[in-house]
Image (cartoon, rainbow, N blue to C red):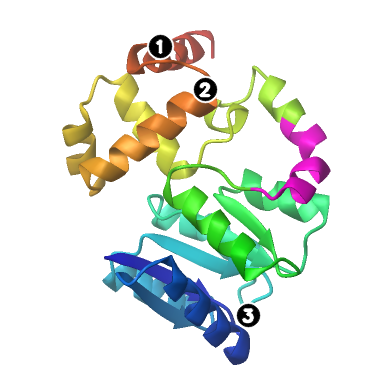
Amino acid sequence: MLRLLVVEDHALVREGLLATLKNLGAETQTFGVKDAGEAVGVLETEDIDMMILDLMLPGTKGLTFLPLVRRRFPTVPVVILSALDDADTVSRVMKDGASGFVSKSGSSTELLDALRAVLSGEIYLPPKLRKLTKNSESAQGEGKGKPLGQRFGLTAAQVRVLELVAEGCSNRRISELLGLTEGTVKIHVSAIMKAMGVSNRSEAALMVSRKRRYN
């Protein structure tokens, strides 16, 4: 069962999103809330696989709420859906740990493609936004003094998995420690190795070891 949480304060937009998400498959359960408080309530009581977050929330804004989610619920990937799709905003939310960004000016097909990509362990940006943030991402990728998570664009959940891989933990052990299924851990490990450009766990662990040694 795939469980998705939509955080959007406009009821009509929220209902439309919930209907669209059903196209991901019959085994999809959706939750729709209007603000950050309700979202935390769902995250605390349900096993959510992914959250779709609008940045323009009343009270606690999405830009403020995203870092909080990453700290309290690091294994839940967050896809940002917003009308604010300028380069600065996109770069900021990706730096804060979003797993994807989709503009509200995009189509439902684009949204579904983005969600499928993130669920498979990828980081998603549509071509237009990828071009807007290319320079900042390139600078981040080349910044060898930066943490590996920032350097390779890893999510908070992937960073935690990487740290445990570096400690020699098996997928089963990682799943026990983080409360994830082994399948989810395998997806994270695959995405980590792809992002880091390594072919196996040992190479990834070696990069972490070298990073720690020179910091």
Residue 153 relative to residue 164: left or right: right
Could you say which is closer to the camera, residue 210 or residue 79?
79
Residue 210, horizontal then vertical, whole percent: 47, 9
Provide the residue span drawn in magenta: 125-137
Q: Does the rendering let one see residue 12?
A: yes
Residue in the image at 26% along x and 65% along y: 1
Give the labeled residue for mark 1. 203
Q: Secondary structure at mark 3?
A: loop
Tag 2 residue: 196
Q: Is residue 135 magenta?
A: yes
Tell me which amino acid carries mark 1. Answer: Glu
Residue 86 drawn at (x, y percent): 82, 56
| Image height of 129 relative to 142, above or below | below
Is residue 96 found left or right of 89 in the rendered image?
left
Amino acid identity at mark 3? Gly
**Residue drawn at the location 34% of the way across and 20% of the way down:** 166
For discs 3 and 2, the disc positioned in front in the rendered view: 2
Q: For numbered disc 1, what is the local secondary structure? A: helix
Q: Quadrant of the C terminus?
A: top right
Circles 2 and 1, Cβ within 8 Å, touching? The answer is yes
Q: Is residue 120 above or below residue 205?
A: below
Looking at the image, tell me whether mark 3 or mark 1 is earlier in sequence order.
3
Distance from disc 2 to disc 1, alpha carbons, whole Å, reads 9 Å
Residue 25 is tagged as: none
Q: Residue furthest bottom?
A: 12
Give the answer, above or below, for where 98 lies relative to 5: above
